[in-house]
Image (cartoon, helix red, strand yellow):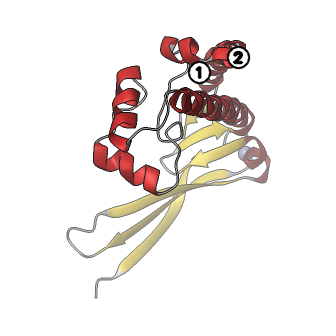
Amino acid sequence: MSRVEHDSYKESDCLCGQGQVTKHVASTDYPFGGADVRYTLDCSHCSRTWRLQGSGTFVDRATEQAAARAGEGAMALYRQHAALASQIIDRHMQALGPMTRKAELEELHRLGFSSATYAAYTKSRREGSSPGEAAHARPGSRTLLQIAGPDRADVERLGREIEAADAAYKEAGARVVRRRVGA
Ligand SMILES: [Zn+2]
């Protein structure tokens, strides 16, 4: 059995100066074990504003949460787009009439909506996915627009919204405030 030794000591003052950042080191006497280092922010005042990442970086909670919300907003739009694209692709496939799995996949490959192997495609079909659900059309796909029929305006709107949401997410990510401990 190897022994684990825990050491804790003050790494630096916190950002407001009323508390501190504590470094915790857990090391074993096992030669290849290395040491496990983590930091805690021991200040009730700073903890409200800052989160301390294990690696020793303060992250401002408000700007981090804003970025997370922006990311969730973009993800919701991507899910809406995927659901609409599935419907459109299924309608397209139905209009072509009954098909073998092989012909379905060839059509999806032709349209650029799948790069799946036959084995992977038939597996997802067996598991209950429709052809549209087994496919993937990226937002902004011209081919999807061409077969969208009555959903064309919605596809275009979602494409624009996704573009804006992606930009907002990127911006919010760049605005997350981080500070190195002790800097
Ligand atoms: Zn503080």
Amino acid at the residue labelled 2: Pro
Residue 149's spot in the image, x, y percent?
64, 15
Q: Which mark, residue 60?
A: none
Q: Is residue 96 above or below residue 116?
A: above
Residue 166's spot in the image, x, y percent?
61, 21
Give the image quarter of residue 58.
top right
Q: Identify residue for label 1.
A: 170
Q: Is residue 95 above or below residue 30?
A: above
Numbered disc total: 2
Amino acid at the residue labelled 1: Lys
Q: Closer to the camera, 142 or 171?
A: 142
**Mark 1 Cβ inside 8 Å of ligand 1:** no
Residue at (72, 34) in percent of width and height: 69
Mark 2 touches mark 1? (CB < 8 Å): no
Q: Closer to the camera, 151 or 176?
A: 151
Q: Earlier in the sequence, mark 2 or mark 1?
A: 2
Label 2 crowd bin: few (<14), some (14–19), many (20+), radius 10 Å: few
Residue at (62, 15) in percent of width and height: 163
